[in-house]
Image: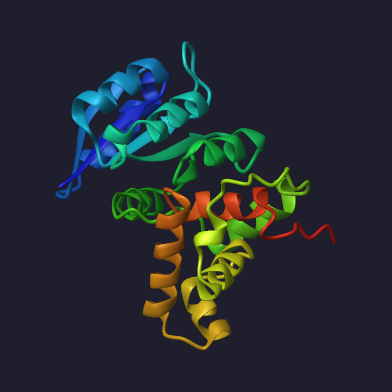
Amino acid sequence: MIRVLLVDDQPLIRSGFRALLDLEDDIEVVAEAADGSEGLELAKEHLPDVALVDIRMPVLDGIEATRRIAADPALAGVHVVILTNYGLDEYVFEALRAGAAGFLVKDVVPEDFLHAVRVAARGDALLAPSITRKLINRYVTQPLPTDPDTGLEELTTREREAVVLVARGLSNDEIADRMVISPLTAKTHINRAMAKLHARDRAQLVILAYESGLVAPRTS
């Protein structure tokens, strides 16, 4: 059973999502919150698999709520999916940097919404290669100062190569083709890199690769 927490300040939005989720045999809505502060407390209480969090809320917004969830070791199993009306904007980017596994636009079709909840519950990032490329092209245009404690020196040559390809927006199958290895081996390289770099998911790995200077943004 996939346990879901809904965090949105609009009751109508919450009730709509809940009605949709309640129809699924493998999904259970364990709690609802009207702001990020309440959502954080309910996350600690219920330890959901997925927290669907609105990005703009009173008291505590979705970005700060995500940041606090990601920083709490006791909530390591909680995968935050940001809900937004605005698509891929600067707020979504900040939420991904804060630790969100991905994002959904609120007008998503029901089938895609339910698929996204299941993907997030498995621990996979909700960033398709096309979205990764948009993220890179629109927001990662200025490399930040390299952090000497990124942990990049712990990566093997093949792991670094895999991280670079993830940051370029390639899927696991594409990475496997480029590196001439099996998809399973590609996934293993990526998972090991995530563990060494303390990245919660693929989204975090992409951002870390750019912010550390491992990958340089393409400006053209």
User: Which one is nearer the viewer's eye here, 15 or 30?
Assistant: 30
Residue lying at 42% horizontally and 27% vertically, measured from the top left: 68
Position in image of residue 94 (x %, y %): 59, 35
Q: Residue furthest bottom?
A: 180
Camera sees residue 202: yes
Position in image of residue 73 (x %, y %): 31, 35
Give the quadrant of the C terminus.
bottom right
Q: Residue furthest top?
A: 59
Position in image of residue 88 (x %, y %): 62, 43
Classify 169 as above or below 90: below
Where residue 20 sits, quadrant-wise, is top left
Residue lying at 36% horizontally and 19% vertically, measured from the top left: 11
Residue lying at 53% horizontally and 41% vertically, measured from the top left: 96
Classify 18 as above or below 155: above
Q: How is the image coloured?
A: rainbow
Camera sees residue 35: no
Position of 57 with respect to 6 (left or right) is right
Q: How many marks?
A: 0
Position in image of residue 204 (x %, y %): 51, 49
Where residue 47 sits, quadrant-wise, is top left
Classify 79 as above or below 53: below
